[in-house]
Amino acid sequence: MEHTTTLTEPFAGQHPAAPGSTLVAIWTTVVRWRRKTRAMAQLHALSDRSLADIGIDRSEIESVVWLGKADPTRRPR
């Protein structure tokens, strides 16, 4: 008796990810993370006055870098 398997409707038309796509996604995530940590370090190195000139409190550095203007907890300026 021969056993065959066919694709059912939920899997029809789906293709496996390209072999390098997972590596590209991981690399992209690492690069973004490194850029954000570098940006935080540069902002932490600024004086409070310099931060105030660009409209950021020292306590807001992480949220500004990671969330940008989308941070709902930032007070309006």
Image (cartoon, rainbow, N blue to C red):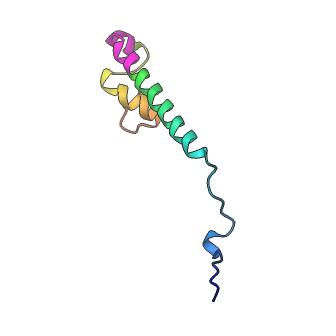
Q: Which residue is located at x 39 percent, y 22 percent?
A: 40
Q: Which residue lies furthest to the front in this view?
A: 1
76 displayed left or right of 17: left
- Residue 6 in the image, given as x and y percentages of width and height: 65, 77
* Residue 46 on the magenta segment: yes
Q: Which residue is located at x 62 percent, y 69 percent?
A: 11
Q: In which quarter of the image is residue 76?
A: top left
Above or below — where is 44 with respect to 15? above
Asked whether residue 76 appears in the rendered view, the answer is no
By secondary structure, the bulk of the magenta-drawn segment is best described as: helix
Which of these two is toward me, 61 or 73? 61
Q: Quadrant of residue 48?
A: top left
> Magenta residues, as a range?
41-51
For the image, the number of numbered tags is: 0
Q: Which residue lies furthest to the right in this view?
A: 13
58 displayed left or right of 7: left
Please state, as top left, top right, bottom left or bottom right, where the C terminus lies in the image.
top left
- Residue 46 in the image, given as x and y percentages of width and height: 36, 11
Please state, as top left, top right, bottom left or bottom right, where the N terminus lies in the image.
bottom right
Which of these two is toward me, 34 or 76? 34
- Residue 3 in the image, given as x and y percentages of width and height: 62, 83
* Residue 77 on the magenta segment: no
- Residue 35 in the image, given as x and y percentages of width and height: 47, 25
Q: Which residue is located at x 37 percent, y 19 percent?
A: 41
Q: Residue furthest left?
A: 59
19 displayed left or right of 40: right
Above or below — where is 58 with respect to 33? above
Asked whether residue 26 appears in the rendered view, the answer is yes
Above or below — where is 8 with respect to 52? below
Q: Which residue is located at x 61 percent, y 72 percent?
A: 10
